[in-house]
């Protein structure tokens, strides 16, 4: 009778540990999804944080492979670069038409 109770207690503890590990694994999945969703949140628009994540094989754990923090070009520079490229393309077309 005592052996049965001891085995029952051990079995219930094992099941509890398995449930705990499974729930912890689900929390890790949720935290990764929350991390991915919160990456789009803008704190300082003039700087960008790039995070590369890699999933471990045969596991649900995700490892951060690289994090780079760099300054973002202001929109005026992007507009000027695009305008310069359009002007260069127009000049090429004019040169082709002249030949």
Image (tube, grey):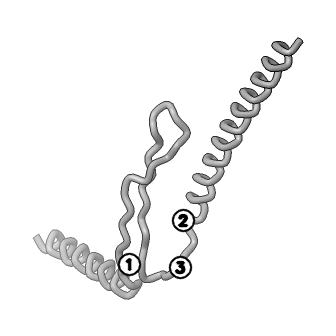
In the rendered structure, the answer to whether residue 17 lies left or right of residue 39 reads right
Relative to 89, is 3 above or below?
Answer: above
The quarter of the displayed image where residue 37 is located: bottom right
Q: Position of residue 15 (x, y in %)?
A: 75, 28
Q: How many other residues sit within 10 Å of disc 1, few (<14), some (14-19) or many (≥20)?
A: few
In the rendered structure, the answer to whether residue 16 lies left or right of residue 41 reads right
Q: Kindly identify the residue that appears in the image at 55 percent across and 67 percent down.
A: 40
| Disc ID at residue 43 | 3
Q: Earlier in the sequence, mark 1 or mark 3?
A: 3
- Name the residue at the bottom extreme: 76
Relative to 85, is 68 above or below?
Answer: above
Name the one closer to the observer, 11 or 22: 11
Name the one closer to the observer, 87 or 50: 50
| Disc ID at residue 72 | 1
Measure the C-alpha gap from mark 3 to mark 2: 10 Å
- Name the residue at the right extreme: 1
Numbered disc 2: secondary structure? loop
Numbered disc 1: secondary structure? loop
Q: Position of residue 61 (x, y in %)?
A: 52, 43
The quarter of the displayed image where residue 10 is located: top right
Name the one closer to the observer, 2 or 92: 2
| Disc ID at residue 39 | 2
């Amino acid at each position: 009778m005592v052996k049965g109770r001891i085995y029952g207690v051990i079995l219930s503890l094992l099941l509890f540990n398995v449930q705990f590990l499974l729930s912890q694994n689900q929390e890790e999945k949720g935290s990764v999804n929350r991390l991915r969703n919160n990456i789009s949140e803008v704190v300082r628009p003039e700087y960008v944080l790039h995070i590369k994540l890699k999933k471990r094989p045969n596991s649900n754990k995700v490892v951060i492979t690289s994090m780079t923090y760099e300054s973002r070009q202001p929109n005026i520079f992007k507009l000027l670069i695009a305008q310069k490229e359009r002007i260069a393309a127009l000049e090429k077309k004019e040169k082709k038409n002249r030949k």
